[in-house]
Image (cartoon, rainbow, N blue to C red):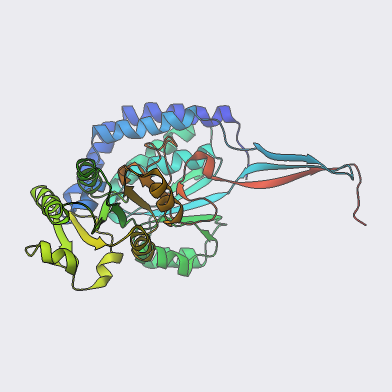
Amino acid sequence: MKLLDTKIKNKVLESMISILDNDRNKILEANRKDCSLFSKDDRAMYDRLVVDNKKIDGMITSVREVRSQEDPIAKIKSKRSLENGLLVENRTAPFGTIMIIYESRPDVTVEASVLAFKANNKILLKGGKEAFNSNKALEACWHKALKENGLDTRWIRLLHMNREETQRFLKRPPEKLDLIVPRGGERLISFTREHAQCAVLVSGRGNNFLYVARDADWERSIAVILNAKTHKISACNALDKILIDSAVPGFEDKLKELYNTLRAKGVLVYVDNKVADVLPNAETIKDEAIWHEEFLAMKCCIGSVGSLDEAIEKINTFSGGHSSTIMTKDNDKALRFMEQVDSAAVYHNASTRFTDGGAMGVGAELAISTDKLHHRGPLGLEQLVTNKYYVFGNGQVRV
């Protein structure tokens, strides 16, 4: 893998900023073709597919932010001189070739590529067929930026393959793959893990939980729940499950208020048996499997728990390991929740919608990793590197 000078990488990104702005009408026209062929019945998928001027502005901002960030390659992580005279340095290094598999979101074609490229990785983009025209237009922008600066277009490539062709590609890749990032549901992740011949870093399902402790500020809890559930239902950081402590003062009245507030916003509410006693008009949960489900829709579940420990156990049993929130005035209780809940991001009195590279100050993100190796949470520029040991000697031999 040839290491590119930071200046040339930043020049490509400068070009890309101008090209995205100048070619926005081509991008919008390509996206209109995709949208006209897609059914709006799947609202979450359709929302992800749509590109407008605001979304193009967001792409430009992502490229600009990554351009301004420090080059993450060849940074010294550790350095030590040994008694035998060897100097051992651990430095950051590119992965090599990254493949990302994703559905619907054309903006991933920009965000994933800008991060991979600045971190000196080649990237193979396997977008969904529903965004074919949009992705093709964005790939053309990247290729124009690369050519303007004398670089090979193979740094950033869009793969046009159906499911069977993708399976064959993963089993017998025609070139060396170093990392695959599947962004999607359980079927995509299982498919990738089954067939991949290299490391897989999972950007898994959301299915995020919020627990309202008995001492929580109720008005604040309602506001956070509404934001987390209804702000953007197509996001993996949207809220799906709400657990209410049964010792909350005015438990029944507060359940009714929460239910009515959610229904007024168009949210379909499922409830467990104890909550159903208070909310007989709500849909009663008949299959416990629903607690595992990521909705990506105007749906949620409300359940009752008797303690903080019960809430933690339920979250760790059913959640996707993405984001979890506790609403409480007790800082010690919050810290206990945050330490024991097994999620990539844990919150105290805040919406799960902040699990996002930009919102967390990371900048553009390749994905939200729910894996524990090598990184968990937003995959930004600093996370798209591996490491390499540089050992300097003057003839030492081991005895």
**Quadrant including the N terminus:** top right
In this rendering, position of residue 49 left or right of residue 67 = left
In this rendering, position of residue 242 left or right of residue 250 = right
Q: Is residue 225 above or below residue 246?
A: above
Extreme-bottom residue of the structure: 287
Expressed as whole percent of the image width and height from the top left, the position of residue 216 reads 27, 46
Can the viewer see residue 397 in this picture?
A: yes
Question: Residue at the location (88% across, 44% down)?
Answer: 83
- Residue nearest the observer in this picture, 258 or 382: 258
**Quadrant including the C terminus:** bottom right
Expressed as whole percent of the image width and height from the top left, the position of residue 346 reads 40, 48
Q: Is residue 55 above or below residue 304?
A: above
Q: How many marks?
A: 0
Expressed as whole percent of the image width and height from the top left, the position of residue 266 reads 10, 51
In this rendering, position of residue 111 left or right of residue 82 = left
Extreme-left residue of the structure: 281
